[in-house]
Image: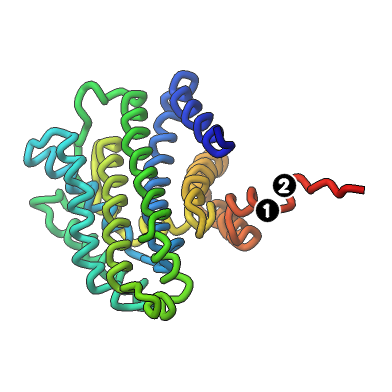
Amino acid sequence: MGRRTAVWGIALAAALALPLVLSTFFIVLLIEIAVVALFATAFNLLMGFGGMVSFGHAAYFALGAYAAALLAQKAGWPMLAALAAAPLVAALGAFVFGFFIVRLTHTYFAMLSLAFGQIVYTVIFKWTSLTGGDNGLLNVWPPTFLRSQTAYYYFTLLIIGTSFLGLYAIVNSPFGYALKAIRENPRRARFIGVNVRRHQLYAFVLSGFFSGIAGGVFAFHNGSVFPDFAFFTKSFEPLVVVLLGGVQSFYGPLAGAFGFKLLEWLISKWAPIYWPLFLGAIVIAVVVLLPQGFVGLLERRAWRPRPTIAK
């Protein structure tokens, strides 16, 4: 058994055992960490591996959340069917918007993604007869057998764990390597035969798909959905999480999600009014002092045992 397999086995065993020793509050916190981690990892497929920074990625999280909520509440679909449809709706939205967005680069890419994200927010906010407008959609709960936080935690672990395996396979596939080549030098990637725009569009759609899964899982966990899910401030959450954890590492968003949510909880408990100020200052300090994030800190050579020099 390899070292990495053993570490992941211990982590999985710990994740399965945690609800047995933690209170309901911390189980809820773990569910939120898992959702944020998947959302940030889907975002990092674009930013960390494709070199594309989207400022409107909350749109696909919201599309997944609203699709799940609307299908369950207004169409009467079972939760699992609504949850299965959520990422497809988000991926369809990502395909339509991404078709235009990937034609641009750098600042223009970011600003157009922000514009499409705000369009989604405005439609959700204004289409009151369908989405409930500012009041959102309430009472979006899972079926009885998943009502307890412990049961929903294990359900979340299954869905999001499977999604992580899917994203890991994508990142380490020929498609993932082509994406990294585009990130490093699009012109050279095109020269060796990579269809840059098509790969970027596929990455955009896949990122929207997995963001939709995160949105759907969160909708049933939260019991309600609101237009704020699509607002531009929500788009900065995965960006901050990725910067904290490590941009070009697959495990960075996972470490960043743990760090971000735990810091948010601890600081808001210590300073209930001004906690965003202190949290922002800590995020800035981490980004400046640790350019590779928490994962980069762990991977520094200084932390590794020095080889023994033979005399």
Q: Can residue 106 be seen in the rendering of this structure?
A: no
Residue type highlighted by circle 1? Arg
Residue placed furthest toward the top: 20
Residue 232, x across and y down, in percent? 34, 62
Q: Provide the residue designation for mark 2.
A: 304
**Placement of 163 over or under 54, stated as above or below:** above
Figure coloring: rainbow
Q: Nearer the viewer, residue 100 or 113?
A: 100
Q: Nearer the viewer, residue 62 or 211?
A: 211
Q: Which quadrant: the N terminus?
A: top right
Q: Element under label 1? A: loop
Alpha-carbon span between mark 1 and mark 2 = 7 Å
Residue that appears at 41% across and 51% down: 41
Q: Is 303 left, or right, of 50 in this rendering?
A: right
Residue type highlighted by circle 2? Arg
Residue 246: quarter of image:
bottom right
Residue 11, x across and y down, in percent? 51, 32
